[in-house]
Image (cartoon, grey):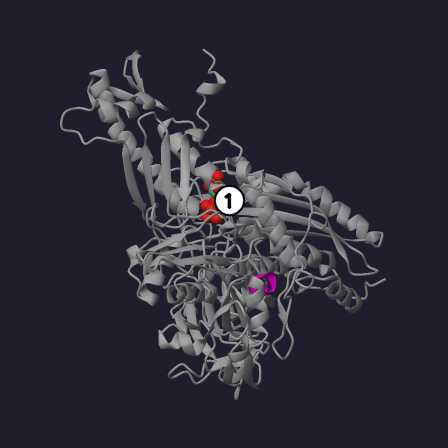
Amino acid sequence: MAVSEEQVIRGVGHSVKRFEDGRFIRGRGNYFDDITLPGMLHLEFLRSPLAHARINGIDTSRAEAVPGVVAVVTGELLAQHNLAWMPTLSGDTQAVLATDKVRFQGQEVAAVIAESAYIAKDACELIDVDYEPLEAVTSPQQALAEGAPVIRDEKEGQTSNHIYDWEAGDKTATDHAFAEADKVVSLDTFYPRCHPAPLECCGCVADVDPATGKTTIYMTSQAPHAHRTLFALVAGIPEHKIRIISPDLGGGFGNKVPIYPGYVVATAASLLIGRPVKWVEDRTGNLISTGFARDYHMHGELALKEGRITGLRVNMLSDNGAFFADAQPTICKAGLFHIVTGSYDIPAAHVETEGAYTNKAPGGVAYRCSFRVTEASYLIERLVQNAAYELGVDPADFRKQNFIKPEQFPYKSATGFEYDSGDYGAAMEKTLEMLGYDDLRREQAEARAEGRLIGIGLASFTEVVGAGHGAEYKIAGLRMNDGAELRIHPTGKAVLKLSVKSQGQGHETTFAQIVAEELGLQPEDVEVQEGDTDHTPYGLGTYASRSTPVSGAATAMVSRRIRAKAQKIAAHLLEASEEDLEWQQGKFVVKGAPEKSTTIQDIAFAAYTNIPEGMEGGLEGVYYYDPPNMTFPFGTYAVVVEIDRGTGAWKVLRCVAVDDCGVRINPMIVEGQIMGGLTEGFAIAAMELIDFDEEGNCIGANLMDYLIPTAWETPKFELGETVTPSPHHPLGAKGVGESATVGAPAAFVNAVVDALAYAGVRNLEMPVTSDKVWAALQEAGLAE
Ligand code: CDP
């Protein structure tokens, strides 16, 4: 009998249209800035115009005299409440409002709380700060040079700008591989500072109720539970008296993971004044002061022997800005950079990193990246491409020859990760086939003979996403685990509550599909709730593509737990023994008697009306998932470009992206994630840059200077997939949210380099602007 449309449960593997879009496209989303509370005040910051200066005094009297100003908050005032400094997620400290010095341009110096945002902004300009300018340190090299001014001189025992040294891998084995190599290929490159720049900037409404002592903070937070715990620890407010509500978010990309001074000052002000306080960050505030990404100087070397990679050596220098504020697992000071061996079977590797303070905004790991994976992927994919040129072999063949083979999984990398599963050759073959690689290489040669410069760039990235395992992966001491709570109501409709927080990734749809898959309800019958700490289970939140690997697994496991109870109820209803029942999606059937069955809806009703004697009522459960390992999605991207020899401008002719994120829960959402990620990867490679002049002035402080691609510049993408399930995830799924942003930049840069490689060009720094290409054309004698 044909299965009718209604009977098909649209669980895992169905491209269900996103439920949340109904409210987003009708303009009915609910963002923090939509929240207006009675008596609400507004907060605006006075930010430092200087990158490095001593503060000799702050006179707030003129600002305080402005009608409508309720309070002017300074660091000195916060210090009286022990709140002038706060801990960062990396265990450092960060100024909430500057007291002794300002340490980057745009740092928060004072805050005005007023009846309107306009009054607050105007009053900020009447605060008089006596600055004594100091030399600005704008690069980690300058920071670590002899005699550099010490930026963090307030820290006891801090006599330089050095933050950390960290290493991974085996130095002796790596040195040996290099001593035995018949060729060494090296690359010095810089992954520049860029910014996640979500459409919605950060902000909050803090509402401390003087009568009950309950603190409610509507806040742009990707990790509401972790933020609540940190608020409790830092401010001393009992945790159960804090409620963080992260409403709809207009994008996050990592920008909404750190705790910013705005959240703290608004909450402190609400507590002191007894009225709600709103802080809305403006675009410049967002670009110059909140979590940026990258800023990594990298040196990599590959040891090559008989066409194989036998060793990898890496040294990195990280510019962390004025406060070491990366959100990252505590065991790895340099994040998860040790995925730098990538997709390749490299027997020996050694990685050394050093971090430095500079007079720039803090951050480093944000922007669709699992804690420095993007930099690692970029480095190895650029190195591998250059190694192929030096050996005179095709870059695709060289990769294939050096890939970890499918039978080697689970694969232990030289830097300590255990890769769960992969088939890199399959993703590569699919990409080459979709691209028509061999024909394209021929066309490239023909075009070159005609004087046209075409380049083909590849990147075969491997990622690591889905932190924990909780025993090893913690942030600020909190295990990186997440909870899922599921309740099936009597009429068979369900509510799923999660600790993660979507910023536009479609969680309300995909997590409902997981419940649908496991229990046989339709996804429309499952409401997914996130973002309210009073009403969702604990967990560390959404970033680094961890929602599906961790909370997706928790959702599957809690559903299975409920199904186990449902089986007992079904046995009672069918008067059969549990063992005689067979689960068919959505119902239990008596084995050998298909006419005897009961649906999950009937069971749900019975859970509240007709349960076996002695059974606890209801049909609900909670599951906290501690992943046994992380997941390792991968893919191969190929980009074809043509360079204009007269201007250095390059345009993208093709972009083929084959991704493998294991089992796809919602293929349409996955494709959307990949297209967005490719757009960002292209943007980082081509145009996005937060730069500084030598006085530490931020260049890129608005969207006229910080270039974000529009649909006009964005290339067309051709997507493909392979499916290699994760063996340890209950659904075989791996994370995907950040894959394309991680994999794409190297493919774009490799494409431009490839067009010029025959003339000896091996590197172009991101963003690869036409002036840089023009200079390379000139140097190579190819300019027209
Ligand atoms: O943590 P975040 O939500 O940013 O990343 P993710 O876990 O990679 O998920 C991004 C979106 O893609 C979510 O809606 C996922 O449920 C969906 N996804 C999927 O449908 N199948 C996968 N294998 C991975 C993600």
Q: Position of residue 551 (x, y in %)?
A: 38, 44
The quadrant in which residue 412 appears is bottom left
The mark total stands at: 1
Expressed as whole percent of the image width and height from the top left, the position of residue 122 reads 59, 69
**Height in image: 729 above or below 155?**
above
Q: Position of residue 589 (x, y in %)?
A: 30, 18
The answer to whether residue 662 is visible is: no
User: In the image shown, does 734 or 17 lie closer to the viewer?
Assistant: 17
Magenta-drawn stretch, dominant element (helix, strand or loop): helix
For the C terminus, the quadrant is bottom right
| Visible residue check, residue 513 | yes
Residue lying furthest bottom? 147
Query: Which residue occupies 57% across, 78% down?
Result: 51
Q: Could you tell me residue 145's position as x and y percent?
A: 54, 84
Q: Is residue 283 magenta?
A: yes
What amino acid type is highlighted by mark number 1? Gln
Tell whether circle 1 marks a residue whose Cβ is less than 8 angstroms from ligand 1.
Answer: yes
- Tell me the SS state at disc 1: loop
Location of the N terminus (image quadrant): top left
Q: Residue at x 45, y 22 (%)?
A: 8
Q: Where is mark 1, residue-wise? A: 505
User: Quick one: 91 or 213, which is closer to the camera?
Assistant: 213
Residue at 82 percent across and 63 percent down: it is 783
Task: Say if 63 sits above or below 224 in the image.
Answer: below
Q: Does residue 746 appear left or right of residue 310 in this picture?
A: right
> Magenta residues, as a range?
282-287
Q: Is residue 567 magenta?
A: no
